[in-house]
Amino acid sequence: LSVDVTDINGETQSTSTAIGIGYVALSISLDIPRLINKEKKQEFTIVSENLNGTFEKAEGRITIHRLVSPGKPFRERLWKQPDKFIYTREDYKRDFPYDAYKDEDSPHTWKREKEVYNGSFHTAKEKNIMFKGMAAWEQGKYVLELKTADKYGFPISLEKYFTLYGSSEKSLPVQTSI
């Protein structure tokens, strides 16, 4: 939206602003990095805004689950995942044991093992959050799920994947690509 106004002296004043329009009245984000050292105490910031970037209070729940990795490393893909498969899964695994058949190398498809954190948040009271007991969690890949609703009751969820490691640990947190 832009407005130009000319006064009686012929001076023109201009201003403009952007107006966000959408079906959801809330945008929420969490500044959690992809790698987290469990031996350091860290706070993470929850940002809740309306579509114009103005603070909007939000409250909801955060759960964190440890993911079950496939248990073996995969080679980096040399090409994109196919949309049509000519091999059966068993034949492919037999002939190419170090390559992912479909999407088993993606943490988004891994099963959730156990819940390690379940807590609430309220951005009007506190925008920063600490996950208590993180130092005792096992190394590995985790998924954080944040659930809330906008002021009209429309549900909003956010998923973030991260790897938890310990700098004093003797093993890798996740099997990496070969």
Image (tube, rainbow, N blue to C red):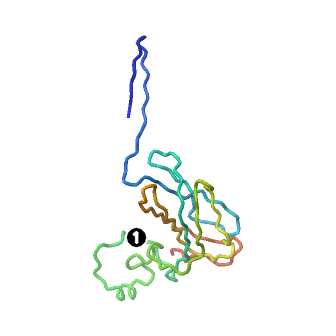
Query: Residue 169, percent across and down?
Result: 69, 76
Q: Report whether 26 appears left or right of 175.
A: left
Q: Looking at the image, is 90 positioned above or below residue 122?
A: below
Q: Looking at the image, is 148 positioned above or below residue 140?
A: above
The answer to which of 150 and 69 lies nearer the viewer is: 150
**Image quadrant assignment for residue 3:** top left
As drawn, which residue projects farthest toward the top?
9
Query: Helix or strand or loop: what does disc 1 sit on?
Result: loop
| Local crowd size for mark 1, using a 10 Å CA cut-off: few (<14), some (14–19), many (≥20) | few
Residue that carries the numbered disc 1 in the rendered image: 78
As drawn, which residue projects farthest toward the front?
152
Q: Report whether 129 appears left or right of 30.
A: right
Q: Residue at x 43, y 36 (%)?
A: 17
The answer to which of 48 and 66 lies nearer the viewer is: 48
The residue type indicated by label 1 comes to Leu
Q: Residue at x 70, y 64 (%)?
A: 41
Number of disc labels: 1
**Image quadrant assignment for residue 89:** bottom left
Q: Quadrant of the N terminus?
A: top left
Q: Looking at the image, is 171 positioned above or below residue 13?
A: below
Query: Residue 8, percent across and down?
Result: 41, 12
Query: Residue 90, percent across and down?
Result: 36, 88
Query: Residue 177, percent across and down?
Result: 51, 74
The answer to which of 107 and 53 lies nearer the viewer is: 53
